[in-house]
């Protein structure tokens, strides 16, 4: 009797260990890091999100919460700032985000859908028309809707099937949509919302071998017009970006990522007048994912500007928490 029980228990223990290896506790780069710092239109060129297309079993749910502190000149609409010739501008912002993400079966391919809602409190200062001014804002910024799919190397698998899955080369695509639902007053220069829709399609690939994962993504931000910013219409060209990530997994759920990105484009027109605000900037960052328990994990994030030619020059520190359930976990 005892021997029989041991023979049954051993495979179960092994299955649980394998599933824990596959589940990778931290939700990987699905907009949460991007959501922290949403008040910054200039920062949207490079979100620096590792593991954006890492596979996970279908039916897994994530509840996300985070806090970030950002400082720099990123916290206002660059196009409006250029039109009014704001000088020596800087800001500090405290921001929280909450979100929900679910893994789905998209015609046999693994996918994710989710939403991120940010709440911000910030203070800005600068020289406008030769006069020093300060302002504070608090409220909701624009929410993000998220969808991603892995169309090569990331099949849709249930919890039992996922046990035998081993990630190697993955190719995927994603779409982020920022909806103009945040706090906005057309008579104000500084706003938490942007009063326009933004869309970010992205494609990328990753390759895992042993403890290492290397990733390369390309994306473009597309903007609708802001019809009323201080009485003027703002138009903006697309912003193109390229980002790379090197990730080392110490053990299941515990990993460190080093990130780099480059963005260019985004020239704006205010009231039909073309502005000299063509952007070229690069970012560096690092992320550490730490498992707390079977269903809980934390992520520590740092992002900084390596070089900037017009646009956001900032530092952001973030702490992100995740709870997950479902998919037989």
Image: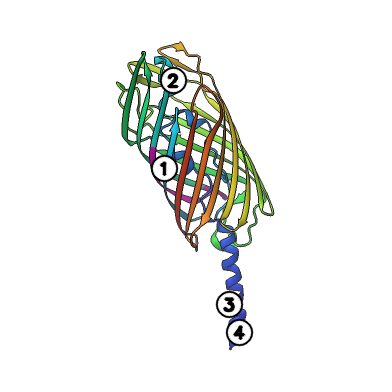
Q: What residue would you read off at disc 3?
A: 9
Q: Which residue is mark 1?
A: 116
Q: Tell me where residue 82 appears, x and y as whole percent.
A: 44, 17
Outermost bottom residue: 1
Which residue lies under the disc numbered 4? 4
Disc 1 residue crowd, few under 14, some 14–19, many 20+, Cα 10 Å: many
Instruction: Identify whether 161 is placed above or below 48.
Output: below
As measured in the structure, the alpha-carbon distance from the residue carrying label 3 to the one carrying label 4 is 9 Å
The part of the image, by quadrant, that contains residue 261 is top right
Q: Residue at x 44, y 39 (%)?
A: 35
Label disc, if present, on residue 79 of the rendered structure: 2
Tell me which label, 4 or 2, sits earlier in the chain: 4
Q: Position of residue 272 (x, y in %)?
A: 43, 11
- Per the image, label 3 sits on a secondary structure element best described as helix
Measure the C-alpha gap from mark 2 to mark 1: 25 Å
Look at the numbered discs 1 and 4 and tell me whether their residues touch, using CB distance below 8 Å: no
């Amino acid at each position: 009797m005892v021997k029989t029980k041991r023979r049954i228990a051993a495979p179960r223990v092994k299955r649980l260990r394998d599933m824990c290896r596959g589940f990778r506790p931290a939700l990987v780069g699905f907009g949460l890091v991007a959501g922290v710092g949403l008040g910054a239109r200039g920062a949207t060129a490079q979100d620096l999100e590792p593991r954006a297309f890492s596979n996970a079993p279908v039916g897994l749910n994530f509840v996300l919460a985070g806090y970030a502190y950002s400082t720099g000149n990123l916290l206002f609409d660059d196009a409006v700032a250029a039109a009014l010739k704001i000088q020596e501008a800087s800001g500090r912002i405290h921001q929280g985000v909450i979100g929900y993400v679910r893994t789905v079966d998209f015609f046999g391919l693994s996918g994710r859908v989710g939403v991120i809602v940010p709440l911000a409190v910030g203070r800005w200062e600068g020289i406008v028309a030769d006069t020093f001014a300060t302002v504070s804002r608090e409220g909701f910024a624009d929410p993000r809707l998220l969808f991603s799919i892995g169309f090569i190397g990331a099949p849709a698998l249930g919890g039992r099937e996922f046990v035998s899955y081993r990630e190697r080369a993955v190719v995927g695509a994603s779409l982020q949509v920022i909806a103009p639902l945040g706090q906005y007053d057309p008579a104000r220069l500084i706003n938490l919302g942007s009063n326009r829709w933004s869309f970010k399609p992205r494609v990328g690939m990753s390759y895992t071998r042993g403890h290492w994962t290397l990733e390369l993504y390309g994306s473009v931000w597309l903007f609708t017009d802001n019809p009323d910013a201080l009485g003027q219409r703002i138009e903006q060209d697309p912003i193109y970006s390229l980002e790379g990530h090197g990730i080392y997994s110490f053990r299941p759920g515990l990993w460190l990522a080093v990130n780099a990105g480059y963005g260019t484009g985004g020239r704006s027109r205010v009231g039909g007048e073309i502005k000299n605000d063509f952007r070229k900037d690069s970012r560096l960052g690092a992320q550490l994912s730490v498992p707390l328990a079977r269903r809980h994990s934390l992520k520590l994030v740092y992002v900084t500007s390596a070089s900037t030619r017009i646009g956001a020059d900032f530092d952001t520190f973030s702490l992100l928490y995740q709870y997950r359930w479902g998919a037989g976990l």
